[in-house]
Amino acid sequence: MNALHPSRWISIALVLGLLAGLAARADENSQQRNSTTSYPWNTVCCVKIGEYGRGRGSAVLVGPYVALTAGHVVYSAAKEEWHTIYSIAPGQYATESDVVQPYGTKTPCRLATNTGHQETGDTKYDYGALFISSSFSITTYMPLVFEYDPSYVNCAGYPSEDCNFEDRYDYSEMWYDSGDVTDVDSRVLYYDFFLGGGASGCPVWVYSSSKGRRLVGINVAHNGDGEGIACRLVSQNEDLIEEWLDWAPSRTATSLAAVPAEDLLVRRSLVGGGTLPAKDLLSKSALGLVDAPSSFVASATPSRKVFQVIENTLYVWKEYEVALSAKKKGTIVELVRPLSRVLSSSEARVLLSASQKLVGRSLGTDAAVRLPAEDEIPIPAEDLDANVSKRPAANADSIAERSIASDD
């Protein structure tokens, strides 16, 4: 990996400028998304910031109750204060006359970042989370892969492209871009495009025909060279993000419908009934899967470690690339949770097929909201700063959190 060049250090002022949604223009190759109810667009969230929701950021749903975002979207290290998050809306898009929120909106009940961001504001710690007390009815979310060194990445979010914030506070379009990775630091990615202010917190993912889309970082800033910058998913933040993925509001912790792992792996069962169709099963050869030989020993250093909520159950697995011959490799999958065992190639085929074919699946129970594009967001009915509690944390990449009154 290349060392981080001094010219690439990002000032706190620049990061705060991205949060404020200043009129920085997106890359000229960025594409507006007007169809957002399919995956991955239905997991990308517009985040309204401030008491009246006039600021903007982005986030990505990674579980029924949690969305990952930039740390500075939820907490200002410069001001040493938590931001008020007015709402999050997955898949929001804009037409000439309407702002459409196909899944409605929710107000977070809890915010979190890490003490590294809280204490330093450094880009490498610039990740956080938004928690909601009821889900948006999506059952399977984008997988997260840690310590991945990509060469090409994709990104989607809500930049302030062509937006006059004095007159149209709630006008918000989803934009997408992609490009080459220009540098990989131990905890930061650089790529040759950017989406501008308001896109802080949007997902940065890789795509392959055999593995599908996988989240590798969170977009947090851009520099003077026109490079986008992401905080990487790495071993240092893995445990904390897994803790966030596990979180559920106590009153609903046992009420969300889920499918046990054995039912998914053996019977291909889905939440709400039905099964994963046989036609959606990817071939073992396309996935590169092989059965583990008797000599195989699972190690602590797999080729990849993946986290994904599938049918409302958190799965964690390791993928090992093993040499089958001088020119050919195969993949062995070890499931870590909710079960712990090396999977047969048939079981791994179901898991990886479900990972790709079910992702973004929605039960369709959310009510869409349409707002006139010129309307300002109404004043909230209650003070979102009520009932605040903070839990101190001492170490980098340990939790720093704020609990807020329920969004019911």
Image (cartoon, helix red, strand yellow):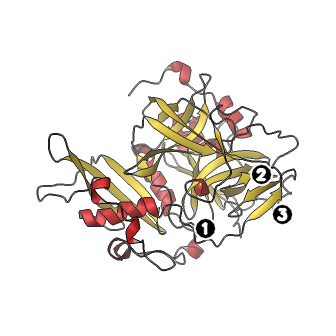
Secondary structure under the numbered disc 1 in the rendered image: loop
Viewer-nearest of discs 3 and 1? 1
Tell me the CA gap for discs 2 and 1. 26 Å
Q: Is residue 1 shown above or below 351?
A: above
* Residue 229 image point, x, y percent: 55, 33
Secondary structure under the numbered disc 2 in the rendered image: loop
Disc number for residue 381 = 3
Tell me the CA gap for discs 3 and 2. 27 Å
Residue sitting at x 17%, y 54%: 297
Which residue occupies the extreme front position in the image? 279
The residue carrying mark 2 is 95
Question: Which of the two labelled residues, at mark 3 and mark 2, occupies the earlier sequence position?
Answer: 2
* Residue 28 image point, x, y percent: 66, 31
| Image quarter hosting the C terminus | bottom right
* Residue 141 visible at all: yes
The residue carrying mark 1 is 135
Which residue occupies the extreme left position in the image? 295
Taking the image as shown, residue 27 lies to the left or right of residue 262, namely right
Secondary structure under the numbered disc 3 in the rendered image: loop
Viewer-nearest of discs 3 and 2? 2
Disc number for residue 169 = none
Tell me the kind of residue under disc 2: Thr
Tell me the kind of residue under disc 3: Ala
Cβ atoms under marks 3 and 1 closer than 8 Å: no
Tell me the kind of residue under disc 1: Ser
Q: Is residue 323 shown above or below 408?
A: above
Q: Quadrant of residue 31?
A: top right
Q: Nearer the viewer, residue 80 or 274?
A: 274
